[in-house]
Image (cartoon, rainbow, N blue to C red):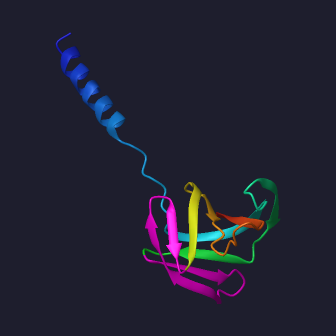
Amino acid sequence: MKYFFPLFLLSGALLTTACDKEDPEPTLLGRWNAESTTGYNYSATGQFIDQQTIEEKRFYLLVTIDSLRYRDIRDGSSWGSAVYTRQGNTIKYGNAEATITELTDHSLTLRFKNVNKVPNTPYQEVADHYVR
């Protein structure tokens, strides 16, 4: 019985410490292999019309602290790169703007706004899905 109280205190301390830890947020940094692209079509009034998904596995995206680098999956040749900024789930580079709609340890989806949208005309937004 005299060992019960110290054991109880130790168990409580371990339980409190274990419950205080949160899972780390998944990181955007690293290599992401392209999986698919989905086009979302809208009418001139902004009504959703339809969507189409195509398999896209020809490239990968390498995300560093300050740049995005698109590379050919076969030989690593450059498809382009850009310096980016991130605020929350919004990524901006050049005149492009994307929203992170999914970010887990193994999955990333970036949805791009149509920055060249002409008022009162149909338009499309695109989402790229990546895995690692």
Camera sees residue 35: yes
Residue 29 image point, x, y percent:
49, 68
In-front residue for pair 43/60 = 43
Residue 108 image point, x, y percent:
61, 60
Q: Quadrant of the C terminus?
A: bottom right
Q: Quadrant of residue 130?
A: bottom right
- Side of 74 where 26 appears, left or right: left
Camera sees residue 132: no
- Side of 112 where 39 appears, left or right: right
Name the residue rendered at 29%, 31% in the picture: 16
Residue 86 image point, x, y percent:
45, 67
In-front residue for pair 23/41 = 41
Which range of residues does the magenta coloring cover? 66-94
Q: Quadrant of residue 57?
A: bottom right
Residue 70 is one of the magenta-drawn residues: yes
Name the residue rendered at 63%, 67% in the picture: 112
In-front residue for pair 12/53 = 53
Name the residue rendered at 32%, 37% in the picture: 20
